[in-house]
């Protein structure tokens, strides 16, 4: 019975070895790489991914050779897996690039410097890099108006030189331009000249079409009288789309009426003191194309500006009135904004809700803002109210509340001032339990100064009070705390006697610094 068990275990042990031999697995005992410099061999070994004493099949070894070829810096990679488990690799590296020349069609003048700026001397251009250069050059040629262009990159002289064969093909030109819509008061020649379009010469590219639309929009916007900057054709539009026939471009033009932009309730003299101009509020002139939503956007910008300046009840509306022509075909339009700023409010009382750990007196000191003209309360600007919320949040974070959330609610008080109610969700308060400093046993390391520096990274230096044995800290939220320093015996640190510890329960946290062989600093106890 025992003999059968031993024979069964032996057969099971020999089964994997037999399977490995049947599948062609061999145990590597040596890997030898020949050819190239040290960097080539190091990169080849890393890409090969095989190590001595590792089992590998013939198919797996060929796959590893493919990975080495993908390094893309070798002219050829040959390898052999011996019967004795030895692996040999022969590398023929590519030489650094020295020269390249263009053949075939001439490079377009607009692409002489931008077709392939990635080519540099000293590079090793393998098959993958050359294929990437071909795709990159062909994409740039298509964007420049040569949809049938092809580029071939051929390596010669073991990679020292490149031949770049260029075939441009037929360019994509704008053969015909058909203008639709109402041209008046412009002529066809003026529109094409301003757009920079010349049938039979201009290439059909997205950049050219986009530039032509921007130029026409600029033509409409700047068509104003010399003494006014707000009566251009701000509602003019131009749209360029491809036609049904090849090379046909459709230009749909609507110059629009003369637009007079004005406002009531805006003091123009305030622009001398930082108030934006009306044209900056209403983005009609800067927009690439006109849309009625731009008028509503301008009203929203004016409202936001005055509310940020302390006018919480500011309201803005606008009217569009046709002054000449008909509603279907207007010739002159007046757009007027009516601004009702309302009273300018001052900041009133500040209320706190949800503060349990910190008193209202502490929080009120943090939200104390400077007065206007030394005795007037600040205006209720948006940034001022936001600063109150940020100050309370920062104070809670300093006091050990990492999960604090502060929201604000604004109300109008009985005296007309703006009262801010800060709703606080404190969360769990966390303390720094221990601070451990681990240093190597090196006699040259200044353990004492390093331990003190670690403390100083989390707190200000404790300074003595002249004429007494008391010490104070300059940190703002530790005001009112005083302590004394007591000397401790110098000696090696131990686990039962930590070398440095901050004693006391009135401080928000205490520290312990553990360092092998570090002389313990002095002990401080709060008073």
Image: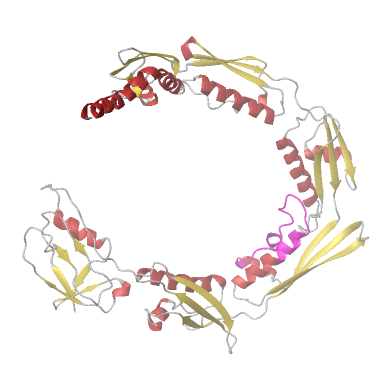
Percent position of residue 354, x then y: 45, 79
Whether residue 434 is visible:
yes
Q: Nearer the viewer, residue 484 or 56?
A: 56
Q: Farthest residue in the right direction? A: 326
Q: Nearer the viewer, residue 77 or 129?
A: 77
* Quadrant of residue 298 within the rendered picture: bottom right
Taking the spot 20% from the left edge, 70% from the top edge, the residue there is 463
| Quadrant housing the N terminus | top left
Q: Nearer the viewer, residue 337 or 472?
A: 472
Q: Farthest residue in the front direction? A: 1
Q: Farthest residue in the bottom direction? A: 414
Q: How is the image coloured?
A: secondary structure
- Considering only vertical position in the picture, is 331 above or below 74? below
Percent position of residue 451, x then y: 18, 58
* Quadrant of residue 461 within the rendered picture: bottom left
Taking the spot 80% from the left edge, 44% from the top edge, the residue there is 239
* Quadrant of residue 135 within the rendered picture: top right
* Left or right for 277, reference 22: right
For the record, the magenta segment spans 273-299
- Considering only vertical position in the picture, is 315 above or below 335? below
Taking the spot 15% from the left edge, 54% from the top edge, the residue there is 447
* Left or right for 457, reference 420: left
Percent position of residue 383, x then y: 53, 70
Whether residue 294 appears in magenta in the rendering, the answer is: yes
Q: Farthest residue in the top direction? A: 157
């Amino acid at each position: 019975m025992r003999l059968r068990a031993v024979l069964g275990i032996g057969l099971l042990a020999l089964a994997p070895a037999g399977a490995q031999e049947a599948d062609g697995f061999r145990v590597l005992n040596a890997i030898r790489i020949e050819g190239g410099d040290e960097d080539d061999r190091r990169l080849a070994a890393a890409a090969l991914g095989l190590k001595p004493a590792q089992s590998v099949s013939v198919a797996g070894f060929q796959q590893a050779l493919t990975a080495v070829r993908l390094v893309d810096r070798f002219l050829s990679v040959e390898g052999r897996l011996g019967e004795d488990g030895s692996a040999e690799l022969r590398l023929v590296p590519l030489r650094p690039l020295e020269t390249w020349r263009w053949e075939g069609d001439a490079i377009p003048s607009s692409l002489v410097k931008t077709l392939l700026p990635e080519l540099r001397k000293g590079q090793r251009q393998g098959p993958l890099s050359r294929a990437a250069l071909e795709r990159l050059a062909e994409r740039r040629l298509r964007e420049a108006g040569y949809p049938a262009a092809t580029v071939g990159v051929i390596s010669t002289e073991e990679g020292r030189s490149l031949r770049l064969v260029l075939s441009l093909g037929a360019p994509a030109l704008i053969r015909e331009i058909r203008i639709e819509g109402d041209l008046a008061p412009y002529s066809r020649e003026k529109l094409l000249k301003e757009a920079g379009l010349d049938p039979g010469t201009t290439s059909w590219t997205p950049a050219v079409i986009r530039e032509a639309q921007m130029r026409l929009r600029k033509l409409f916007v700047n068509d104003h009288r010399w003494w006014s900057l707000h009566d251009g054709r701000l509602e003019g539009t131009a749209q360029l789309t491809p036609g049904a026939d090849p090379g046909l471009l459709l230009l749909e033009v609507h110059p629009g009426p003369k637009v007079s932009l004005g406002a009531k309730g805006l003091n123009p003299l305030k622009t001398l003191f930082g108030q934006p101009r009306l044209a900056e509020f209403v983005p009609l002139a800067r927009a690439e194309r006109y849309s009625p939503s731009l008028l509503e956007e301008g009203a929203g910008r004016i409202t936001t500006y005055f509310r940020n300046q302390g006018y919480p009840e500011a309201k803005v509306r606008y009217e569009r009135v046709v002054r000449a022509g008909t509603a279907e075909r207007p010739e002159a339009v007046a757009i007027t904004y009516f601004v009702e700023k309302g009273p300018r409010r001052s900041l009133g009382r500040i209320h706190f809700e949800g503060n349990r750990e910190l008193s209202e007196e502490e929080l009120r000191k943090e939200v104390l803002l400077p007065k206007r003209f030394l005795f007037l309360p600040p205006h209720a600007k948006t940034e001022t109210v936001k600063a109150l919320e940020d100050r309370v949040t920062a104070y809670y974070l300093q006091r050990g509340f990492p999960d604090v959330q502060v929201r604000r609610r604004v109300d109008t008080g009985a005296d007309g001032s703006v009262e801010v109610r800060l709703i606080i969700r404190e969360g769990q308060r966390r303390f720094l339990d221990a601070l451990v400093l681990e240093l190597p046993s090196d006699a040259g390391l200044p353990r004492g100064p390093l331990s003190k520096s670690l403390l100083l990274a989390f707190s200000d230096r404790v300074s003595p009070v002249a004429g007494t044995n008391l010490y104070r800290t300059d940190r703002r939220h530790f005001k009112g705390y005083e302590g004394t320093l007591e000397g401790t015996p110098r000696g090696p640190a131990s686990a039962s006697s930590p070398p440095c510890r901050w004693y006391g329960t009135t401080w928000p946290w205490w520290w312990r610094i553990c360092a092998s062989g570090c002389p313990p600093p002095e002990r401080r106890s709060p008073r």
